[in-house]
C-alpha cells in the first residue's frame, strides 16, 4: 500500500513552502496532497480533512505549514495518530519570536519541528521508510546525492587550485 503525505497549509501565502516540500516528495516518488485550512479560521474544515485522511488506511506523515502562532501543527497533532512535522515558513516580522509557538506544545501534543522544507520532506520519507524499503532506499539515495555534491565540489576546488 503506497504512502501519502498530507501537506496542510494555513493560508495561500504558505504555498511556496509547500511547493518546496512537494518538489522533494516528487523526487522521492511519494504521493502527497496540499490542502489549505486554518486552525483559527476554519477549524471545522481542518477537522473534516483530518477525518478523511485518518479514514484512509495508507501509511502517512502529516506536514503542517503555518506561520505566526502556528496553531495548525498542534491542532493537527492532537487529532491524529500519525506523525506530524511542523515546518513553519520563515518570518522577519517577529524577529523569530513566532517560532516559540512551534517549540512548546502541551503535553501529549508532539509535532516535530523542522525549519527547512527539504529536510521536512526527508524526515517524512525516513519515517515512512521504516516500513517501506523502497522509500527508505530513495531517501538514502537523496542523501547520497547531497554527499556526492559536496565531494564533487571539493574535488573541483582542489583541481582548480592545482593541488594534489
Image (spheres, rainbow, N blue to C red):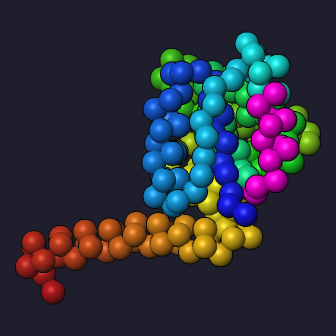
Residue 54 magenta: yes
Q: Report the front residue among 67 and 10.
A: 10
- Residue 10: x and y, percent? 64, 24
Tell me the quarter of the image containing the C terminus: bottom left
Tell me the quarter of the image containing the N terminus: bottom right
The answer to whether residue 93 is above or below residue 96 is above
Residue 156 magenta: no
- Please tell me which residue is depicted at 82% across the width and 27% down the height of the picture: 47
Asked if residue 39 lies left or right of residue 32, the reply is right
Q: Is residue 110 visible?
A: no
| Residue found at the very far right of the displayed protein | 107
- Please tell me which residue is depicted at 31% across the width and 74% down the height of the picture: 151
- Residue 51: x and y, percent? 84, 35
Q: Quadrant of residue 49?
A: top right
Q: Main secondary structure of the magenta part?
A: helix
Q: Which residues are magenta?
A: 48-59
- Please tell me which residue is depicted at 61% across the width and 40% down the height of the picture: 33
Amino acid at each position: 500500500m503506497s504512502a501519502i503525505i498530507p501537506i496542510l497549509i494555513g493560508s495561500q501565502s504558505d504555498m511556496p513552502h509547500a511547493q518546496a516540500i512537494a518538489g522533494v516528495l516528487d523526487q522521492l516518488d511519494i504521493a502527497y496532497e496540499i490542502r489549505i485550512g486554518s486552525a483559527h479560521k476554519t477549524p471545522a474544515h481542518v477537522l473534516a480533512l483530518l477525518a478523511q485522511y485518518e479514514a484512509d488506511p495508507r501509511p502517512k506523515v502529516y506536514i503542517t505549514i503555518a506561520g505566526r502562532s502556528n496553531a495548525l501543527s498542534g491542532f493537527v497533532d492532537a487529532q491524529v495518530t500519525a506523525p506530524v512535522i511542523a515546518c513553519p515558513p520563515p518570518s522577519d516580522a517577529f524577529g523569530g519570536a513566532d517560532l516559540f509557538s512551534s517549540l512548546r506544545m502541551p503535553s501529549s501534543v508532539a509535532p516535530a519541528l523542522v525549519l527547512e522544507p527539504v529536510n521536512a520532506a526527508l524526515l517524512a520519507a525516513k519515517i515512512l521508510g521504516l516500513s517501506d524499503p523502497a522509500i527508505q532506499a530513495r531517501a538514502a539515495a537523496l542523501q547520497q546525492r547531497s554527499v556526492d555534491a559536496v565531494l564533487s565540489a571539493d574535488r573541483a576546488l582542489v583541481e582548480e587550485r592545482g593541488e594534489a
